[in-house]
Amino acid sequence: MRKKWLALVLSVVMGLLVFAGCGSDGKDSGSKSDKSGPSVALVLGTGGLGDQSFNDSAYKGLQKAADELDADVQYVEPKEIAEFEGHFRDFAKSKKYDLILGIGFDQADAVTAVAAEFPDQKFVIIDGSAEGDNVTSINFKDEEKAYVLGTIAAMTTETGKVGILGGMDVPSINVFVEGFKAGAIAHNKDVEIMVKYVGAFNDANTGKELALSMYDAGADIVMQAAGGSGLGVFSAGAERGKLAIGADVNQIPIDPDVIIASGMRTLDNVVFDQVKAVKEGTLKSGDVMLGFKDGGVDYTTEGTKKMPSQEALDAAAAAKQDIVDGKITPPRTAEEYDAFVKNLK
């Protein structure tokens, strides 16, 4: 009797261990047994789902792949940067994924390390650059859309002061900052531009505090480039009766009375396209840059209740076309911004 009882306990424990080992940190959208498409894993950024920005857009593309390509998909929502490498390694070790996707510059080191350990595994990092013959790195010319949004801000401000809130003081966010500054100064040489950084992409409270400080210092328009932290800009704008500009997706529906325009990355389409490429056997490693001309970035004013003037809209459209035509090259760094300003007529 004792042996039977021990055997039963052992059976239950083993069953629990097996269950725990089947992606307990991730969320599945179907099992491989009922899916005919590629198997794909996605490591989201630390902001997680619900940021109404970068992560939500990537997840939308993943779900589109599940629906239209019959892909078997799984994703994880890391809380800390330190978790990235473990998630990538766990996915790779399982040997069940045709593609492992990551989003965000802060995942680059993790992807580079794990890709070297698993040379037969395909990886894609979006908005970051990682090394490896089995890695595709996709980045966006965010300075292009930021330039146009800076144009709108500079031609809409009534105080002559605008601001931009970055998530972190890093190159991938500074392209927003420098592009925004360039677009603003090119269309209003007297505009004052404030810049602040949250230090995180998942801290809306600090984002709100910093936005309030810019509004209280005279800015009447603040652009957010801070992921989930940027949601604080919109609540600050509503509290002070000021205006804001969104990023990554059309964020205007969050508060049409505050948000006058929004930058967009077609991140959902990029994720979907990578899964499709894997399915069709056409995925290539290397670096890819997507801008206005490639349809990788764009901007919109759709849905706002505080529509910019026609003059501002026309200037924005003209700026976009000049960028597409190669007549304007928005700066990506502080040094390029300084050179841009010197060359202004």
Image: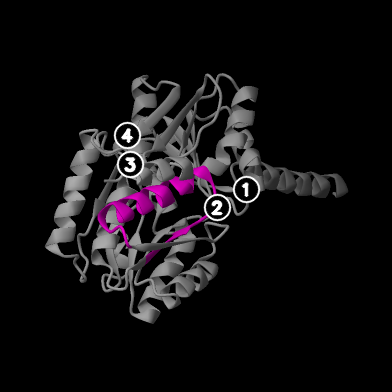
On the image, numbered disc 1 is attached to which residue? 81
Q: Which mark is residue 166?
A: none
Within-10-Å neighbours for mark 1: few <14, some 14–19, many 20+: few
Amino acid at pointer 2: Thr
Eye-nearest disc, 4 or 3: 3
Taking the image as drawn, is residue 292 in sight?
Answer: yes
Alpha carbons under labels 4 and 2: distance apart: 27 Å
Q: Nearer the viewer, residue 57 or 91?
A: 57
The x, y position of residue 309, in whole percent, is: 16, 65
* Upstream in sequence: badge 4 or badge 3: 4
Eye-nearest disc, 2 or 3: 3
On the image, numbered disc 3 is attached to which residue? 343
Alpha carbons under labels 1 and 3: distance apart: 40 Å
State the residue at coordinates (14%, 54%): 314
Question: What kind of element bears circle 1?
Answer: helix
Which stretch appears magenta? 162-190
Q: Which mark is residue 46?
A: 2
